[in-house]
Image (tube, rainbow, N blue to C red):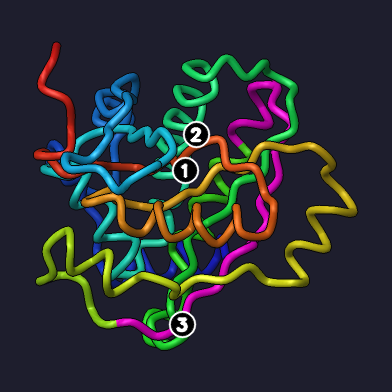
Amino acid sequence: MGVLSALMDLVTGSACPGCGQPGTLLCDGCAAALTGHARESLPTPSPPGLVRPWAAGEYDGVLRTLVLGHKERQQFSLRRPLGGLLAGAVTGLTEATRVAVGTPLVLAPVPSQRASVRARGHDPTLLFTKEAARELGRLGHRVRVVPLLRVARVRDQAELDAAGRMDNLSGSMSVRSRGLARLAESTARAWVIVCDDVLTTGATAAEAQRALRACGVGVLGAATIAATRKRLPTGP
């Protein structure tokens, strides 16, 4: 993926969306400015019983540009900074829930529909979740990425409100038997964290949580790179 990433970045052009510095998809200064902002971001209204969701920042400005660049414009090099931000959200979640460093963690990426993966040529959530796991490993966490979930075909959610998203996703996810077997064989008594790019209404996280718990999988919370403004708390 490294050579492909470099080639794609050259083809699509690269300039930091924060400061415009040419030759880089994200300069070190702008990357540093995005870190350290992870916080709990419970949707309002929240799906009943939703686990604690943490986001690395607001889905706006530079962060929105990065998410869309990786997801829609094949700027594969962005998986590293995005993975680092997701790792920050996971760290915030584990600290808030008092999970000790070294406790086994499993990151379960929210699945993309097969048609979307084919159209994009990659699964963006899986890519940056793997990068997050590498960063968390460097921080001393025992963490693995296991694609536990699969999703049936659903409508595009862009124009749906919170109730519409819940109805659209209800019952759409299930747990892969192969992924569940891998989890049972290699990571006993691990906490699972649902990982995604953006938290909007919480409907996706709630459906993932339902599917996992229906199979007896303990879900610690959800971690995302970003959350929409109206879903972020209003405090300092």
Q: CA distance from mark 1 to mark 3?
A: 26 Å
Callout 1 touching callout 2 (CB < 8 Å) = yes
**Residue at the image position 68 percent from the left and 56 percent from the top:** 146
**Residue carrying label 3:** 152
Mark 3 vs mark 2, CA separation in Å: 28 Å
**Picture quarter with the N terminus:** bottom right
Q: Which residues are magenta?
A: 135-154
Identity, as a three-letter code, of the amino acid under mark 1 = Gly
How far across and down, in percent of the image, does residue 8 sit? 39, 70
SS at circle 1: helix
Which label was assigned to residue 173?
A: none
Whether pointer 3 and pointer 2 mark residues with C-beta atoms closer than 8 Å, the reply is: no
Residue 221 is situated, as x and y percent measured from the top left of the image, at 49, 37
**Secondary element type, mark 2:** helix
Task: Please state which amino acid type lies under the numbered disc 2.
Answer: Ala
Q: Earlier in the sequence, mark 3 or mark 2?
A: 2
Of 129 and 184, the residue lying toward us: 184
**Quadrant assignment, res 48:** top left
**From the viewer's perspective, is 142 left or right of 230?**
right
* Residue that badge 2 annotates: 87
Q: Indicate whether residue 150 is drawn in magenta.
A: yes
Asked if residue 41 lies left or right of residue 111, the reply is: left
